[in-house]
Image: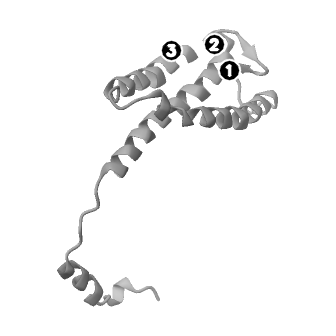
Amino acid sequence: MTYARFLGIFVVLPILFLLVRYRRTLSWRGLAPMGLLFIVVYAATSPWDNMAVKWGLWGFDPERIWGVKLGYLPLEEYLFFGLQTLLVGLWARDRLERVLAKKPQPVSQEQKSVRAERTLEPFEVSP
């Protein structure tokens, strides 16, 4: 499998799924903070990956990449950095919105007193 096909199946398709699923709540304003995240990801990952390939820690089969390289890394690797960040960012953004949208359930006075009066069992206390 080529690197581009891997990206298409395992990264781009899930991104498209998330974009369709959350299309009503997505906005450029909501996605703007990911721009800063992209800068951090590329700044942190590019030097490390370039050095790792240069030192021979891993490499890329020339028959499985497009052949365009920036430094020691193929273009697909740089695409992976950004696409993976987008995938995780979309998912995390939706999860965070769901958590923040939930209203805390009020705790009754009876539940509060049960919590306060309960004593610990011997097996619950560490030695």
Could you say whether the residue bearing mark 2 is in a helix, strand or loop? loop
Q: Is residue 33 above or below residue 82?
A: below
* Three-letter amino acid code of the residue under disc 3: Arg
Residue at the spot 47% in from the left edge and 25% down from the top edge = 11
Could you say whether the residue bearing mark 3 is in a helix, strand or loop? helix
Residue 89's disc is: none
Residue 118 occupies quadrant: bottom left
- In this figure, which residue is indicated by the disc labeled 3? 5
CA gap, disc 2 to disc 1? 7 Å
Residue 62 image position (x, y, % from top left): 68, 12
- In this figure, which residue is indicated by the disc labeled 2? 65
Residue 83 located left or right of residue 73: left
Q: Out of 76 and 43, give the one closest to the viewer.
A: 43
Asked whether disc 3 touches disc 2, contact meaning CB atoms under 8 Å apart, the reply is no
Q: Out of 96 and 30, give the one closest to the viewer.
A: 30
* Three-letter amino acid code of the residue under disc 1: Phe
Q: Which of marks 3 and 2 is nearer the N terminus?
A: 3
Residue at the spot 31% in from the left edge and 88% down from the top edge = 121
Residue 37 located left or right of residue 89: right
- In this figure, which residue is indicated by the disc labeled 1? 60
Residue 19 image position (x, y, % from top left): 39, 25
CA gap, disc 1 to disc 3? 14 Å
CA gap, disc 3 to disc 2? 10 Å
Residue at the spot 71% in from the left edge and 38% down from the top edge = 44
Residue 2 can be seen in this image: no
Q: Which of marks 2 and 1 is nearer the N terminus?
A: 1
* Three-letter amino acid code of the residue under disc 2: Ile
